[in-house]
């Protein structure tokens, strides 16, 4: 019986040592959503983003969309053949490691702030805990 209790204690300790890495979900633009009335670049400065985190773009699909572009597309508010288009009004887009660039396809809206650049870094690894075990006899 004591041996079973010791094994159970070790198993519980091991479970406590493992921290799951979960992505964080962010609502782009907060309560206002993906909209020209929000400074998207200013909104993004309040967070630290990691690869695998999810951005949720909420917007009126009759007026706006989200285009995943390269840096040139972001800087010039232009769409290239490699761009990826989202238009559901509720798009959930996971961040890739490194630079991620988003714009609205309307150049005027894009130039007025409906563009976003995020550098997603690697998620830090949780510290490992040393587990001291003893032989149970």
Image (cartoon, rainbow, N blue to C red):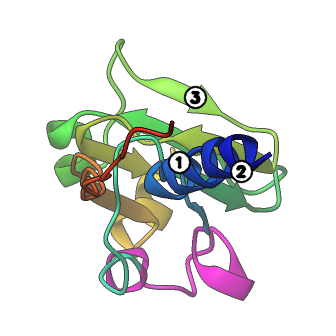
Left or right of 53 on screen, residue 30: right
- Badge 1 element: loop
- Left or right of 1? Residue 52 is left
Q: Earlier in the sequence, mark 1 or mark 3?
A: 1
Residue at horizontal 21 percent and vertical 50 percent from the top: 121
Q: Looking at the image, is mark 2 or mark 1 earlier in the sequence?
A: 2
| Viewer-nearest residue: 77 or 17 | 17
Q: Mark 2 and mark 1: span between their CA atoms?
A: 30 Å
Residue 26, x across and y down, in percent: 59, 66
Residue 47 visible (yes or no) = yes
**Residue at label 2?**
2
Q: Secondary structure at mark 2?
A: helix
Residue 31 forms part of the magenta stretch: yes
Determine which of the numbered discs, if any, sits on residue 20 in the image.
1
| Residue denoted by label 3 | 85
As measured in the structure, the alpha-carbon distance from the residue carrying label 2 to the one carrying label 3 is 61 Å
Percent across and percent down for residue 40 are 43, 75
Tag 2 and tag 1, C-beta contact below 8 Å: no
The residue under the point 84% across, 51% down is 62
45 sits left or right of 103 in the view: left
> Up-down: is 5 above or below 31?
above
Label 2 packing within 10 angstroms: few (<14), some (14-19), many (20+): few
Residue range (magenta) = 27-43
Q: Which residue is located at x 32 percent, y 52 percent?
A: 131
4 over 75 or under it: above or below: above
Percent position of residue 1, x then y: 80, 45
The residue shown at (71%, 44%) is 91
Secondary structure beneath label 3: strand
Magenta stretch: residue 131 in it? no
- Which mark is nearer the camera, 2 or 3? 2
Residue at mark 1 to residue at mark 3: CA–CA distance: 32 Å
Which one is in front in this view, the residue at disc 1 or the one at disc 3?
1
């Amino acid at each position: 019986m004591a041996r079973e209790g010791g094994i159970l204690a070790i198993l519980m300790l091991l479970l406590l040592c493992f921290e799951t890495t979960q992505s964080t979900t962010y609502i782009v633009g907060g309560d206002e959503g993906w909209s020209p009335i929000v400074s998207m670049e200013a909104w993004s400065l309040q967070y630290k983003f990691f690869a695998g985190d999810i951005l949720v773009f909420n917007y009126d699909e009759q007026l706006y969309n989200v285009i995943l572009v390269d840096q040139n597309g972001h800087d010039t508010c232009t769409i290239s053949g490699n761009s990826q288009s989202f238009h559901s009004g509720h798009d959930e887009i996971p961040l890739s490691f490194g630079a991620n660039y988003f714009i609205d396809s309307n150049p005027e809206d894009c130039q007025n702030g409906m563009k976003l650049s995020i550098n997603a870094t690697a998620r830090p690894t949780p510290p490992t805990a040393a587990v001291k075990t003893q032989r149970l006899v």
